[in-house]
Amino acid sequence: MDVFYLILIFFIGGLWQTEAVSLTGELGKDVTVTCSHTNAFSNIKYFCKGACNDEDILISSSVGGEDAGGKYSISDEGNTFHVTISHLTEEDSGTYYCGIVRVGRDTYTKVILTVKKEDTGSDETITSSEMLVYIGAGLTLLSLVLVMALLIFFKHRNRNMVSRPHCDSRAVALMVPEQNPPVEPAVPQLSSGSATAGYRSAKYTPPEWFSNCHTILQQAGADCREAQSVQRLSKTLHRDTEAATQKTQAEGTRLLGDRLQDIHHWRSELQRHIERLQADTASLLALKTRLEKALDATETPYAISADNLNCRTRRPGPDLVRDSVEEELLKEVDLIRNIQALLKKTTAQVVTQIKRNREAKQTLELDWSDKYEAYNFDDRGGRYSNTSPDTQRHASSASMQDQVSNPAAWTKFTQDNLSVAVQEEQATSNLRMLVEQVLRDTTEDLRAQCSSVDQAFSQRCVEMKEAKAQLEIRLTEVLEQIGAQERNIVALQQAIHSKEAPLRVAQSRLYVRSLRPHMELCRDEPQLSLEGEVRQIDATVASLQQQLSDARGSLSHLEESRMALEKDVNCKTHSLFVDRDKCMTRREQFPTVSTLSGY
């Protein structure tokens, strides 16, 4: 039980323990503070000065990597984060704190910054890891001294047969007066003061210790109850708002469905009247034939573009980028599809609108096109759900807009257009002019887009060649560094091995001197020198081994870089083959202007 209390006291005290970091910066330059905490992977980190209130926080990981003035910047790496202070001034000297937001009480690391006017030597930074090394070395030395003192004490006790006072730890814990055993008469000894060894006075009483623990537990319980209350309220609010939102959304979806049925109905009526007009197309057969030939000619560019896109999907993973070539190819595919749709629509107009005048045709097409777009917009809106990836927030979309028509006027407008379309004829000469313009524009657009794609391919090949050359140069540098690092590792291993013989000699001398009898076992100057020599060799070997570990880690990173560079060079070679030898060769079969014009 006593051991449990000691462990509990040590744990509670360690919750608020901080580690001090002292560093020195030069006036006008930058300095970087490195702070390490345990169990802080996703916690918010901040850097503050003074009392660390909200107004004292200089920068936080929750608002970005750099503050508005550019004075402070933060880099979060999980348990470790770095804060850089730029353009140091004398006012920057002082005490800072690296903070971690935690449940309950935040943890801090104290940072003492000193700004000097000129560089008087290399800056020394005592990090938490170095402090641990110093503390560990001091504790080790202290333990050795304590062990030696205990050995001397027990040796004197056994020699002088001095009885040690008895102490009942359970009686102390229960606050019961201890009954002292009968005291035997003390026998005078040659050494004095050894009977009181091992006693010390306590800093706190057991009731104070229990009171402190009870206070901490009560505060933690109160915080837990408050958190549970907030969670219950949050769940209730979430459940109520979720039900109301789903009901409103379902009603909107139903109304959109009704609107789609109305639009589909009137659009079907327009299409039916257009198909009825197609029976009077005898005078436009020649233009209809040209439109059909132009439509067939667009299949070849579409096949070329689709083949280019398919070939480029076989590029290696790192080169699967949405570059300018892919953008232009997608534009070409969309353009061809739009042209195909336009040619089909124009062909339908030629067939259906032979005896109707131009005004009735334009009105009818505009009405049909508007309903087509409106149907697509409403259909797309009706398909939106809470899991749709292409939804966005439009804050002004819910405000009242100027409406062009109401439902009654919208229905009457379509009915009037259908009535005019049935009664009037379209002039054949105007329709011929329209068809000629469509064929000319589509041909020019296709040839212009083809030139844009070819230019993008050429530019991409040039960029690929340059990237490949740079990768090959960097690969040569990495291979040279790998060789140099391997030689460095061999040299470090030889240096470590060379320290083995001096260490054996020093340890053997210490061992031989430990065999000296009685009073000759003295810690004289040779003994101290030998112990210092062993510590120095151990420190040297540890430093060399650490450097060897760093060199091996660097070699491993260089090997990874080499493999990545070789893989990227192969990727660039394959991608260059796809773009230059496969795609650009295929594009030489693009149709001519006369073929695209329908001749």
Image: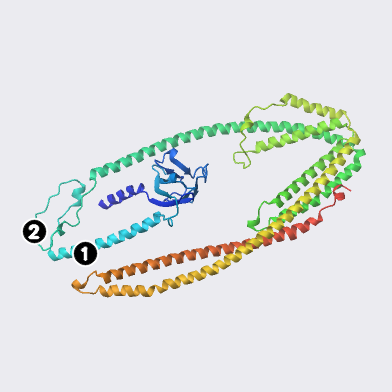
As drawn, is 427 to the left or to the right of 154? right
Say which residue appears at 41% left-offset and 54% top-offset: 127
| Residue at (67, 33) in percent of width and height | 257
Q: Is residue 66 visible?
A: yes
Coordinates of residue 480 in the picture (x, y in percent): 57, 68
Q: Residues within 10 Å of mark 2 (few under 14, many from 20)?
A: few
Which is more N-terminal, label 1 or label 2? 1
Tell me which residue sits at (66%, 36%) in the image. 381
Please give left or right for residue 71 compared with residue 542 in the image: right
Helix, strand or loop at label 1? It is helix
Image x and y of residue 148, in percent: 23, 64
Vertical arrangement, residue 17 with respect to residue 484, above or below = above
Residue type marked 2? Ala
Q: Which sits in the foreground, 414 or 60?
A: 60
Q: Nearer the viewer, residue 161 or 227?
A: 161
**Relative side of 350 to 449, left or right:** right
Q: Marks 2 and 1, Cα distance to the nearest angstrom?
A: 23 Å
Residue 188 in which image quadrant: bottom left
Residue 268 appears anywhere in the view: no
State the image coordinates of residue 13 (x, y, percent, origin top left): 32, 48
Which residue was labeled with disc 2?
186
Q: Is residue 67 above or below residue 575?
A: above
Please identify the quarter of the rendering in which residue 123 is found. bottom left
Could you say whether the residue bearing mark 2 is in a helix, strand or loop?
Answer: loop
| Residue at image mark 1 | 151
Tag 1: residue type? Leu
Query: Residue 472 at x, y = what percent?
Result: 63, 64
